[in-house]
Image: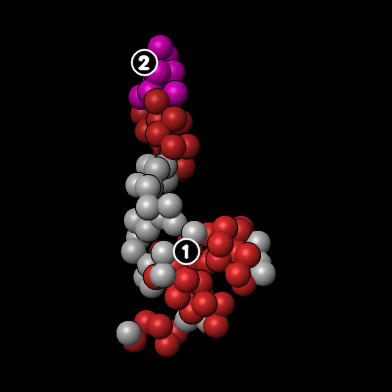
Amino acid sequence: MAEATRLTPRQKAIKERLDKGMQAREIAADLEITRNAVYQQIQRGRRQGWLPADYTPTGQPMRERPGYDTLARLLATESDANGDGEQVAGQLAIVQ
């Protein structure tokens, strides 16, 4: 496992426990760190590639950018009422 050599000691410890099936709460207690610290390392792991991009500690599917989807729906409703679709497209591009 070549990518494991690039991991920090904390990341290695968290990855080992995730591989064993431990939940974030259990990992945090075991390592005496906060759950938030575990979640931050999971996010880094997804970005850096040592965890699958769609990995979640609960095993549930990832949510699809709920903030973006809600904003798109609200702006689309507003543009229909005002007839300014180009402005809405520009606003969404900024968000992405």
Residue labelled with disc 1: 22
Decide which of tag 2 and tag 1 comes sooner along the chain.
1
Residue 23 in percent (x, y) is at 49, 59
Query: Could you tell me if residue 47 is visible in this image?
Result: no
User: Is residue 56 shown above or below 68?
Assistant: below
User: Which image quarter: residue 53?
Assistant: bottom left
The structure residue drawn at horizontal position 34% and vertical position 64%, both measured from the top left corner, is 52
Q: Amino acid at mark 1?
A: Met
For the record, the magenta segment spans: 74-85
Decide whether residue 80 is among the magenta residues: yes
Mark 2: secondary structure? helix
- On-image quarter of the C terminus: top left
Front in this rendered view, residue 41 or 29? 29
Residue labelled with disc 2: 80
- For label 2, the crowd category at 10 Å Cα-Cα, with few meaning under 14, some 14 to 19 and many 20 or more, is few
- On-image quarter of the N terminus: bottom left
Query: Could you tell me if residue 70 is visible in this image?
Result: yes
The structure residue drawn at horizontal position 61% and vertical position 59%, both measured from the top left corner, is 35
Mark 1: secondary structure? loop
Check if mark 2's residue and mark 1's residue have beta carbons within 8 Å: no
